[in-house]
Image (spheres, helix red, strand yellow):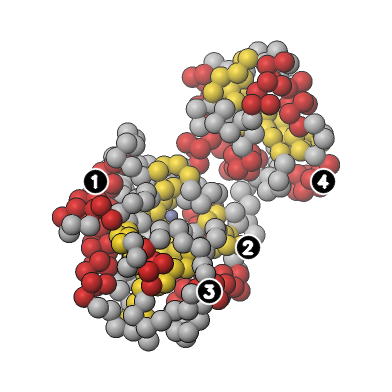
């Protein structure tokens, strides 16, 4: 278990305060739990942060977390209360930036009743979280490495004759055995025609010779999520399976090669889609192309032609094109990648070639 250092937390809060300046607010009320964690180090389930524009702050949690907060949250005043938002409101006056994209209507009303003016915080903390520090990258590396190791172990077989559910649980158990603190999300294990369902939940369908088998899975390490998808064939692939897999592989490679510092986010979307369009499969690509990954499995930036921004170095995100043919089958290939000034670093290091599993 490694946690952010006190210095890293001070640096993150300083950057949040910098971003706050443009809003002219007295401070930032952080209520989104994952953002509270990012700025304070707190890993419990109930907490909030009042971060004043001068950089000082108060961390609020309830009595269950008194000791844990003392261990995890350096450099801030601590306030233990059963009425987190009531106490927070009592400590605020004037104009405060709030995380209105997640704040409940009740809390919003509570702040108003206490005479606090609010301004949307414009996803300040989500923006900071896009760029990872070394400790975060290390956790992501470890999560990705052990995810791939677990999949390689699983693919050593046997797979034939087992149910999707059995195979999914096996993969999850392997990640835990290798040191994951948990799974990053509910494992998708889809076989045969089910592989055409992008977010299929494992069933008792038995894996058979000739099936495409798609596994979308990941481990969580120190709060950081890995995200990886591979699609294999049981037995010998037929021509259709090879064609679809080759198109997805080429699309993924094109999207990945467009991920670099200062490149428009939309450029990778266009590059990956163009390959699918040229191969005649774009209409069968019905999901998002990729997303940031870190303390959340899906976080900013989301790869899309609508994204107007550019990529920053040390951003981690996925690239995951797919082709889904209802009733027949589907292929997705997904890696977690680290943006650099050159080619991105693949954190889920494993071949993207079509594997035929005996
Ligand atoms: Zn995934
Ligand atoms: Zn993903």
Q: Is residue 278 visible?
A: yes
Which residue is the site of mark 2?
Answer: 181
Density class for disc 3 (Cα within 10 Å; few <14, some 14-19, many ≥20) is few
Q: Residue at x 17, y 59 (%)?
A: 279
Residue 204 badge: 3
SS at mark 2 in the image = loop
Mark 1 or 3, closer to the camera = 3
Q: Report whether 11 appears left or right of 198.
A: right
Which residue is the site of mark 4?
Answer: 64
Mark 2 or 1, closer to the camera = 1
Q: Report whether 109 appears left or right of 134.
A: right
Mark 3 or 4, closer to the camera = 3
Looking at marks 2 and 4 on the same chain, the residue that comes earlier in the sequence is marked by 4
Q: Residue furthest left?
A: 278
SS at mark 4 in the image = helix
Residue 97, position in %: x, y? 58, 23
Q: Quadrant of residue 94?
A: top right
Residue labelled 4 has its Cβ within 8 Å of some atom of ligand 2: no
Which of these two is toward me, 207 or 48?
A: 207
Looking at marks 1 and 3 on the same chain, the residue that comes earlier in the sequence is marked by 3
Distance from label 2 to label 4 (Cα)? 21 Å
SS at mark 3 in the image = loop
Q: Are marks 4 and 1 in contact (CB under 8 Å)?
A: no
């Amino acid at each position: 278990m490694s946690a952010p250092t006190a210095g890293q937390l001070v640096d993150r809060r300083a950057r949040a305060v910098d971003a706050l300046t443009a809003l002219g607010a007295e401070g930032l009320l952080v209520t989104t739990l994952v953002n509270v964690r990012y700025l304070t180090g707190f890993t419990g389930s109930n907490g909030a942060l009042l971060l004043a524009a001068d950089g000082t702050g108060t961390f609020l949690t309830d009595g269950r977390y008194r000791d844990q907060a003392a261990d995890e949250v350096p450099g801030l005043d601590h306030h233990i209360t059963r009425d987190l938002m009531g106490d927070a409101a009592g400590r605020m006056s004037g104009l405060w930036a709030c995380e209105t994209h997640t704040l409940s209507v009740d809390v919003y009303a509570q702040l108003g009743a206490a005479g606090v003016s609010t301004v949307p915080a414009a996803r300040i903390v989500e923006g900071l979280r896009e760029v990872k520090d070394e400790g975060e990258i290390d956790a992501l590396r470890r999560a990705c490495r052990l995810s791939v190791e677990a999949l390689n172990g699983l693919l050593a077989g046997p797979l034939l004759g087992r149910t999707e559910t059995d195979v999914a649980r096996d993969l999850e158990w392997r990640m835990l055995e290798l040191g994951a603190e948990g799974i990053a999300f509910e494992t998708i294990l889809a076989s045969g025609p089910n592989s055409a369902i992008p977010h299929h939940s494992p069933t008792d369908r038995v894996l058979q010779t000739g099936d495409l088998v798609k596994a979308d899975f990941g481990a969580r390490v120190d709060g950081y999520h890995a995200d990886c998808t591979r699609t294999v064939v049981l037995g010998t692939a037929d021509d259709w399976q090879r064609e679809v897999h080759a198109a997805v592989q080429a699309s993924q490679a094109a999207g990945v090669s467009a991920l670099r510092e200062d490149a428009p986010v939309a450029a990778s979307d266009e590059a990956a889609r163009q390959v699918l369009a040229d191969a005649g499969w774009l209409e069968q690509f019905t999901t998002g192309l990729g997303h940031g990954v870190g303390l959340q499995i899906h976080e900013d930036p989301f790869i899309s032609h609508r994204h107007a921004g550019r990529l920053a170095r040390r951003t981690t995100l996925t690239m995951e094109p797919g082709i889904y043919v209802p009733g027949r089958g589907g292929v997705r290939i997904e890696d977690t990648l680290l943006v650099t000034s050159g080619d991105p670093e693949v954190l889920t290091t494993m071949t993207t070639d079509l594997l035929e599993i005996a």
